[in-house]
Amino acid sequence: MTEAMPAAASTQPTFAEPAEGAVEHAEAADAVRSRGPEEFRARRERFMASIGEGVAVLAAAPELVKSRDTDIPFRQNSDFFYLTGFLEPGAVAVLTPHDGAHRFTLFVRPRDPERETWNGRRAGVEGAMQAYGADAAYPIEELDSRLKALLEPADALWYALRADGGEMDRRMLALLTGFRAPRPRAGKGPWDLRDPGQLLDRMRLIKEPGELALMREAAELAARGHIAVMRAGRPGVGEWELQALLDQTFRSYSATSGTSFPAIVGSAANATVLHYVTNDRRIEEGDLVLVDAGADVGFYCSDITRTFPASGRFSAPQRAVYDIVLRALEAGIEAVRPGAPANAMHLAARRVLVEGMITLGLLEGDPEKLIEEEKFKRFFMHNTSHWLGLDVHDPGSYTARDGEPIVLQPGMVLTIEPGLYIPEHGDDIPAELRGIGIRLEDDVLVTEDGHEILTRAVPVDPDDVERICSEARS
Ligand code: GLY
Ligand code: MN
Ligand code: MN
């Protein structure tokens, strides 16, 4: 980052109209609250079937302070949400499959008219049972006095360390330790601490139809945001203004929609900074603008990157680099099919990029050797794919315990995101290529017979991109 804060904008981007379809989605896409407890109950049952004699304890996300008495907007822990649908902080779920009548207990913040007047409604103990299907519910203050009895019959405690930031860890470790001394006589109490991620990560990898419906919406919404910024992103506009346009487009879609992560808007050489989020430079004539932004609908994420010419046309060197990244994207997507190893996309995209680096004069030599010696990492230093779902970087192993990549299955959703990042400085780099950064990213569903790209409502073909950029100027 080199630019200081510039003078006032001469050209403002036009703020987006309410996103197309926003009105009819306003209620339905308040998707979390409109989903019944059944989908969550079904998941809990599947999860409980796998933990046998164990007990699972899941904590809501912690509330995080922004400054003094102001919080960062609360976002529920994804695993906790996945199994409960419960959106409030200050909650703990206990799953006890051995107890026929009480398999799902929720500890929640109790109703409190005064606190609710200040900070919003709570489901309370009654709501936890009626709206969220808990078999039993108690005020969170009773957690310590009740947890021991809930854990006692279990052989293992399934609990994710650090899920709430630490406070629950101390409680759970104290309970586990407390079972040690009396266990020989009492014969009760869990021996093992096991990470629920071992089971949940695998469940979350395969998306259910309801989850896919939300992911499709999130993908389409992100595509709209990208088209809006292609139209608005011209010389004189600040990167931050494009970020604001993305935020506005995503947030205005429904009561619970928003951005899935802080948008990256990198113009010129800022595009070569992988996690650039400062977004404080004003776009100049001839710049490329890399925009990596995703929407979140009903807690499900999308993640798209496009790179477009601020002046409406790619220069010849920009286009040459773009074409290579696009070919790498297509090669990566082509590799997505059931049964393919989870690194196939990276290997395919990387091969195209390395050959492109040779064509561009960035590297010399045999592609195999350049890959073996990792020379390509100067220009392409990240992986090509990650899982996508409730989290932008959704959990789940890419590699099995034997070190081999896992195999793709229908229902998995992943990104394909090759890029070329050419440093601004370097005597050995062709001058016309210095400072060019291009990434292209699509979200792809593994289907029964191949794949489906979820994000092509925003074009990636360079002629189409130029057309959208130029349309806005005519
Ligand atoms: N936006 C983060 C990523 O592309 O992985
Ligand atoms: Mn991204
Ligand atoms: Mn990504």
Image (cartoon, grey):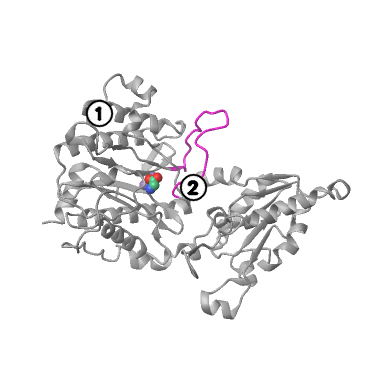
Question: Crowdedness of circle 1 by 10 Å Cα count: few (<14), some, many (20+)?
Answer: some
Number of labels in the image equals 2
Task: State whether residue 22 is above or below residue 415.
Answer: below
Mark 2 vs 1, N-terminal side: 2
Specify whether 192 is left or right of 321.
right
For badge 1, the amino acid type reads Leu
Question: Observer-nearest residue: 130 or 314?
Answer: 314
For badge 2, the amino acid type reads Lys
Would residue 273 be seen by someone viewing this image from the given angle? yes
Q: Is residue 398 magenta?
A: yes
Magenta stretch: helix, strand or loop mostly: loop
Element type at marker 2? loop
Circle nearer the viewer, 2 or 1: 1
Would residue 139 be seen by someone viewing this image from the given angle? no
Quarter-wise, where is residue 385 in the image? top left
- Give x and y (percent) for residue 452: 37, 42
Question: Observer-nearest residue: 177 or 444?
Answer: 177
Specify whether 457 is left or right of 167.
left
Element type at marker 1? loop
Question: Crowdedness of circle 2 by 10 Å Cα count: few (<14), some, many (20+)?
Answer: some
- Give x and y (percent) for residue 185: 89, 48
Asked if the residue at label 2 sits under 8 Å from ligand 3, the reply is: no
Which residue lies at the image location 83% right of the left edge and 49% below the top edge?
A: 181
Quarter-wise, where is residue 224 in the image? bottom left
Look at mark 2 in the image and give the residue it sits on. Answer: 207
Magenta stretch?
392-413
Look at mark 1 in the image and give the residue it sits on. Answer: 362
Mark pair 2, 1: CA separation: 40 Å
